[in-house]
Image: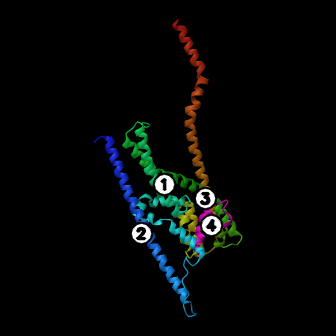
Amino acid sequence: MTADQLTVLSISLFALGLLIAAGLLVLREVQRARSGQTIGRAIQRGLASQKSEGWRPGNKAPVRTSTDDPSLMGTSTAAQELPAHWLQSGIGRALVADEDRRLIDQCGFESVRAQLGFLVIRIVLALALPALGYIAVQTGTIKLNAALVMAFACILGFMSPKWVLGRIAAGRREQVAGELPLFVDLLRLLQGVGLSLDQSLQIMADDFGHVLRILAKELSIANRQYSQGRTREHSLQRLASLHDNENLAGLVALLIQVDRHGGAVQEPLHQFSERLRESRRSELKGRIGKITVKMTGVMVTTLLPALIIVTAGPGFLAVIRSLGAMSK
């Protein structure tokens, strides 16, 4: 068999495997939808029988489900429309690993919907780019081996969504580092006027979202979890560990300690703010030092040749003229 025949055979087998996997996913989704419909019909029959019998004072109140409450029907329907169970399958965990899910959370996207979108985009790009590469090789646009081009295109399509998420997450981490000094100053200000820690965090999440674009959103999630019954330590755990910022983790540890043991928080926040500003000052000095080194290389490659021409050019011309006169 020739190389082209082997390539076509490998592509056909790969496509067949993907079709089988897609068929299994569709079959599993159909079975899940049928089971959901069966459960829904059973619940409806039970509710209809209860309503037909009527309720006496001694009977217990019925359990209110999403079918009874119109305000919950949209949420339940939206949750059922998303095939979130795909993410828990073996293929889903392989294509959307824990690192990818962490990057999606760092980017601030909606968790389940963004993970499903990432899964679909990764599969589509991993299939579409090799097909485009094979077409380009067959038409003569790319003068390379078809198998090599398809392998490179598959790797590029599989990894490019993660690279894009990594760039977005890196930008948001830098933005969090820039918002942290203002966060500490606002917390000191609110604590100084006599508000409690819970009130301060609630006000910062509700009223300062235009200046704390990322931290205010994370505080809203933490406050919502705290109001639902979680402890302050558990609700702030996401804020401490999500963005890989040591200063933010230290501030969260300080807030947890104050919430657990009480006490004045003004002086610890002042010391933390001074230490944060000192660390940022040293970081800026390090960046300036790196820029100086980079500018030295730029000056050597661009300014030094022009300087040599201007200063040593007349001397070189005089030496060349004298050597020419001696040769005559």
Can residue 273 be seen in this snapshot?
A: yes
What range of the chain is rendered magenta? 206-227
Q: Secondary structure at mark 2?
A: helix
Confirm whether the magenta stretch covers residue 217. Answer: yes
Q: Position of residue 223 (x, y in %)?
A: 60, 70
Q: Of all residues shown, which one is farthest toward the right?
A: 193
Which of label 1 and label 4 is nearer to you? Answer: 1
Taking 68 as reference, is 3 left or right? Answer: left
The quadrant of the image that shows the N terminus is top left
Residue to which mark 2 is pinned: 31
Residue 218, by quadrant, is bottom right
First in residue order: circle 3 vs circle 4: 4
The residue singled out by tag 3 in the image is 276
Q: Are marks 2 and 3 in contact (CB under 8 Å)?
A: no
User: Picture coordinates of residue 237 (x, y %)?
Assistant: 53, 67
- The mark lying in front, picked from 2 and 3, is 2
Whether tag 2 and tag 1 are in contact, CB under 8 A, the answer is: no
Could you tell me the amino acid type at mark 1? Ile
Sequence-first tag of 1 and 4: 1
Name the residue beneath numbered marker 1.
121
Residue type marked 2: Gln
Helix, strand, or loop for circle 4? helix
> Residue at 37% of width from left, 58% of height from top?
20
In this rendering, which labeled residue sits more in front, label 2 or label 1? 2
Measure how far apart labels 2 and 3 are at the Cα level. 55 Å
Q: Is residue 290 above or below residue 182?
A: above
Up-down relation of residue 51 to residue 73 (above or below): below
Locate residue 168 relative to residue 153 in the image: left or right. Answer: right
Q: Amino acid at mark 4?
A: Pro
